[in-house]
Image (cartoon, rainbow, N blue to C red):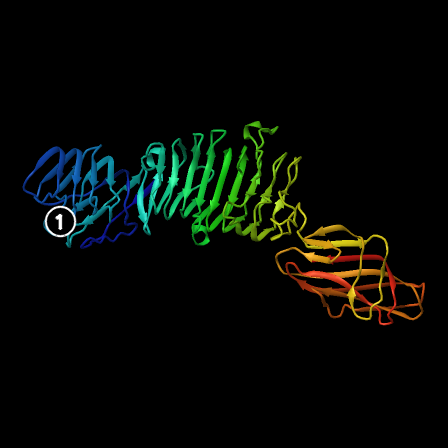
Amino acid sequence: MSTLKVNNIQPFSGTTITANELIATGSFSGSFTGTLDGSVTSASFATTASYVQADNIDQPFTNVTASNYVTAVNVSASSGLYGNSLFLGPTARIQHTNGGSILLLNALDGTNANISSSFSGSFQGDGSGLTGVIAAAFPFTGSAKITGSLEVTGPETSIVNGVKIVEVESEADFPTPVGTQINLESDTTYIIKGTVDVNNTIFASGSGIGIHGVDNTRDTLRYTNSASMLTVENSDFSMQNLRLSATHTSSLLISGSDYTSGRFNQGILKIFESYNFKFRNCCNVASLKGDDLIDLNNVIFTYIQAPDNGLKFQDTSKVEISSCEFIRWYDETSNPTPSGYATCPMIEFDTNGAEDAGFGAVDITSCIIHPQVQQDGIFISTGSTTNFGVISSNTFVNNNLTTGSLIAGSSYDSASAVSYDIEVNQGVEDSVAYLYGYQSGTDVQSASTTYTQVTIANFQTNIETRMSASLEGVVYIGTKPIDVLFQINAGIAGITSNNEQFDIALYKNSALILGSERRLELDAGEEGNVVTFALTNIVENDLLTVYQKSPTNDDFTLQNFSIMIKE
C-alpha cells in the first residue's frame, strides 16, 4: 500500500499547485480513503441525485450530492464539476474518462475554494493524462487547504517516462486473455505484488516490456499450467526483483526467440535481461534462441527439477551470466534427504541451428555452479560454435556429483570449445594450451650442412591441450593469439668421426626462431645433450618444428628426445 499525504496547499493560479509535501501527478486507478476539511462559499441553487452524468456541468449549484456515481467527461478549464459544497457518500466514485483532473474546482467568486467531505470510495482514471489530485479551473487569488491522507489500496496504473506501469495483484490485472493467451502491451512494465497465480499463457512481442517485482523473496509469479508460461518473441524484455515458480512437472517457464533467418545477423536485434531474480520450485526453466544480448545478473536458480531444459541457449549473439547461483537442483520437499534431481544440464549451449549461426560471445563469471548426481554444470554441445568465450572466476562444486560433469560436452581442445578461455575457476583446470611429447626409440639423422627438419619416426604425447602433434610438427588449434614457451631436450650420439658439429634450432612456420640455435661438438661414439628454448607468439594453425644441421656434414643418432610447449 502506498500513501499520498497532501497538506496545506498554498495559493495557486491556473492549473498549477504548489504543496509543501507532495503534488500527486500521473495517471492511476485505485481506492482512496481520507478526510478533506474546509468550506466553499456562495451559491443560489441546490439539487440532489443518486447519479449525475454530464458532458458539461456549468451552472452554479449550492450542493451537488451523489450517493452513487459522479461522472465528469471532458473536464477542462471551461467545464467541470464545481459548486459551493460537494458531498460524497461513503461508496461514491468519481471517474474521469477524458484526461484532466479528478476533481476540478471552479472558484465562482474568485476568492476561496475548499472542499468538505468524509468518504471511503474510489477515484478512477483512464490513464490518459491525469495532472493532479486537485486542480484549479482557472486563475484565482484565494486559497485551498487539504488535510488528511489519500491511501492507494488497489492496483495502480501510471505513466513514467513514456512507460506504462501496471500493478498486478492477481491474474485479472493482466490484459484480458485472448482465448488462453495474455498479450502483454509494448512499453509497459508489470509490477507483481505478492504471489500471483497464472493459469493462462503469457505472450510478449514488442518494445520495452518488463515483468518486475519489488522483493524476489515476497513477489512471486507462479504458473499453474503445463505448457510454456511466458513466450517472448522479438522483444526487448526485462525481468527484475521477482521470483518465478511452477506447479506442473512438465511446464517450461520461458520460451524465447529473436531470430529471423536470412536477415542481417539473422535478425538478432533484441535484449533479454534479468537482474536480482529467482527461479525456484519449478521444472524446465528456459529455452532461448537468438537475441543480440541475453544478460543474467545476480539470478538464483534453485530447487529445480528440470527433466529437459535448464538454462538452454541457441544461436545467440552475446550471452552474459554473472554473479548467479546454480544450486540444489532437486525437489525442495525432499529435504533433508534430497531426491527428485534434475536430469538436464544447468547451463547448455545447444547445437547450432540450420543456419549455423552459433554464438558470437559468451561470458560466464563469478558464479557458483553445483551440479549433482547426473547433472552437468555447463554443457557445450559438440555441434555448437563460439567465436569468443570466457568462463572465469567461478566456483564449481562437485559434492554428490556421480555421472555428471562440471563442464561437459566438449574437451578443451575440441572444435566447439577451443575459443573458450576457461581459467581462474575453483574446481576445474585452466584451458591452458599445453603439449608434452617424446620420441619412442632412436632415429638416425642424415648429414646436411643446411637446416632440415628433424626426422622422428615415432612421436607420442603424454598431454595435448589445444595442440595437435604429428610427424610434421605441432599445430596450435586454439583460436586466440597466445605467447608460448617452446622447449626441447635432445640426446645426440656421434657416428662416424671426431670433431663432429651438430646444430639444433626451433622453427615456426618454416622460419627460424631467432636465438634458439644451439651447437654440440662430439667425437665418434660420444653422446651429448642439447637443450634449447624460445618464447614466441602463435596464432591458430601455426606450426612449431625442430630443425638440425651439421656444419661438418656428419650423420648422428637422435635419442632421448622430448618436447614441451606451454602457454
The residue positioned 13% from the left and 37% from the top of the image is 53
What residue type is disc 1 on?
Answer: Ala
Name the foreground residue: 138 vs 324: 324
The residue positioned 20% from the left and 49% from the top of the image is 135
Name the foreground residue: 138 vs 488: 488
Assign the C terminus to one quadrant of the image. bottom right
Quadrant hosting residue 38: top left
Q: Is residue 241 visible?
A: no
Q: How many marks?
A: 1
Q: Indicate left or right for 339 with 49 as reference.
A: right
Q: Residues within 10 Å of mark 1 (few under 14, many from 20)?
A: many
The residue positioned 69% from the left and 64% from the top of the image is 509
Name the foreground residue: 27 vs 49: 27
Where does the image place residue 138, in percent across and percent down from the top left? Answer: 15, 53
Q: Secondary structure at mark 1?
A: loop
Q: Indicate left or right for 557 with 544 as reference.
A: right
Name the foreground residue: 179 vs 108: 179
Q: Indicate left or right for 342 with 141 as reference.
A: right
Assign the N terminus to one quadrant of the image. top left
Where does the image place residue 524, in percent across and percent down from the top left? Answer: 94, 65
Q: Indicate left or right for 254 with 18 as reference.
A: right
Quadrant hosting residue 116: top left
Where does the image place residue 193, in percent across and percent down from the top left? Answer: 39, 37
The residue tagged 1 is 107
Q: Is residue 470 above or below residue 288?
A: below
